Image (spheres, coloured by chain):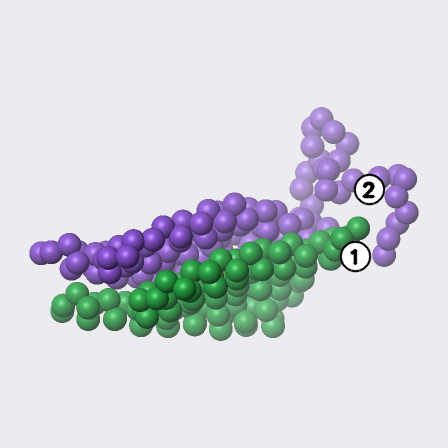
Amino acid sequence: MTAPDFLSLSLTIVFVSLVIGQILSMVRLVLGPTSGDRILALDTMVINAIGLVVVLGISQGAQIYFEVSLLIAMLGFVSTVALARFILRGDIIE
Amino acid sequence: MSGEIIGTYATAIFLLIGAGFVAVGVIGLLKFNDPMTRLHAPTKVGTVGIGALLLASIIHSYTLGETSYHELLIMAFLFVTAPISANFIAKVNIHLGTCETPPKPEIDDNWATLETPDEEPVKN
């Protein structure tokens, strides 16, 4: 197996694994008995989305996807903290 | 074997490592049966999984001849923020009573996150 073939095979494996990860996190988001589980599932989905964007950048050989993934990382952190604070205090900014 | 071929193989191997850790973390998130136990599984996705994917991206850009280290920024950001969000989710679990209450500390009266100040009116 030549090097480009191996790279495209592993790109396919990574895409499939990340998409399965998104689906399983979605299952936990729907099932999740407590609110903590739902916040955790959303956080995992955000992290998987960062991974998907990074792998898309590798497969297309483009550099611009870096900014997209940085923005998604920042938004994901802020939204996780906002959700957790809303449940803890009943308010986000006091 | 030239440098380009070695770089391509390294990219593919780091991608496979990342895929494995992502799969392990998400299966743990789905299969564990306690909220605090579930909290620890996806941390593998956040650190090693995404870290390996970003390393693969750095190596791939180096192989293409246009080296960029921007991905280190995302890695640093994720490594800094992952413990903070995990701490918040653990606090949510403690306050909602969905896990065992931790034993009382030896020195103080109560854990800081469970203390309610007297002055503040109670919010619902």
Q: Nearer the viewer, residue A86 or A25?
A: A86
Q: Position of residue B38 (x, y in %)?
A: 55, 57
Tag 1: residue type? Answer: Gly
Residue A76 in the image: state x and y as whole percent: 57, 60
Left/right placement of residue A64 relative to residue B15 reads: right
Residue A25 image offset from top left, x and y in percent: 52, 68
Kind of element beneath mark 1: loop
Q: Which residue is mark 1?
A: A90
Q: For residue A18, what is the image quadrant?
A: bottom left
Judged by depth in the image, the label closer to the viewer, 2 or 1, is: 1
In this rendering, would B4 be left or right of A32? left
Which residue is label 2 attached to? B116
Q: Say which chain tag 1 marks.
A: A
Is B25 situated above or below B91?
Answer: below
- At x 24%, y 60%, the residue is B64
- The answer to whether residue B34 shows anywhere in this view is no
**Mark 2 element type:** loop
Residue at the spot x=54%, y=71% of the render?
A26
| Residue B86 x/y as whole percent | 58, 50
Neighbor class of circle 1 (other Cα within 10 Å; few <14, some 14-19, many 20+) is few
Task: Please name the amino acid that badge 2 sits on.
Answer: Thr
Which of the chains is purple? B
